[in-house]
Image (spheres, rainbow, N blue to C red):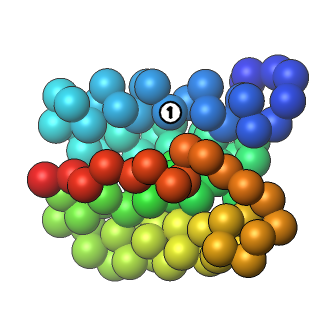
Amino acid sequence: MVGGWPEEGAWACHPAAECCVKLERWRDAIEPCAKGLAIRPATAWLAWLAGFAAFKSKCFEDAIAWSNMAMANGLSTCCAGRTRRSAMTRLRRRQ
């Protein structure tokens, strides 16, 4: 487990998930996302990435669940103005 600041620990899991995505190992990408969310559940980007990977692996019910989590986390941490997350303002479009 990654120690230190919870947000930092969650984001440390992001590169592993991105590597799996680049290799199109969709199911493998979900695990590091889930590990990061276990460290800090309010990390919308990791939930979104897990939803994207689930969609690409044709696990549509899981994709919906992860995406709902991402929307809920994004609304509570970004759009409501409680916490400003610069990383959430520059999401790039995935193909």
Q: Is residue 40 visible to us here? A: yes
Residue 84 located left or right of residue 82: left
Label 1 Cα neighbours within 10 Å, binned few <14 / some 14-19 / many ≥20: some
What residue is rendered at 61% in x and 40% in y?
Answer: 35
Residue 70 located left or right of residue 73: left
For numbered disc 1, what is the local secondary structure? helix
Residue 15 located left or right of residue 24: right
Quarter of the picture holding the N terminus: top right
What residue is rendered at 65% in x and 74% in y?
Answer: 79
Q: Residue 22 occupies which quadrant of the picture? A: top left
- In the foreground, 81 or 4: 81
What residue is rendered at 51% in x and 55% in y?
Answer: 89
Considering only vertical position in the picture, is 8 above or below 44? above
Q: Mark 1 sits on what residue?
A: 14
Image coordinates of residue 19 in percent, x first then y, are: 31, 25
Count all numbered tags in the image, as a single digit: 1
Considering only vertical position in the picture, is 10 above or below 4? below
- In the foreground, 80 or 68: 80
User: Type of residue at label 1?
Assistant: His
Residue 6 located left or right of residue 26: right
Considering only vertical position in the picture, is 44 above or below 5? below
What residue is rendered at 25% in x and 44% in y?
Answer: 26
Q: Is residue 41 visible to us here? A: no
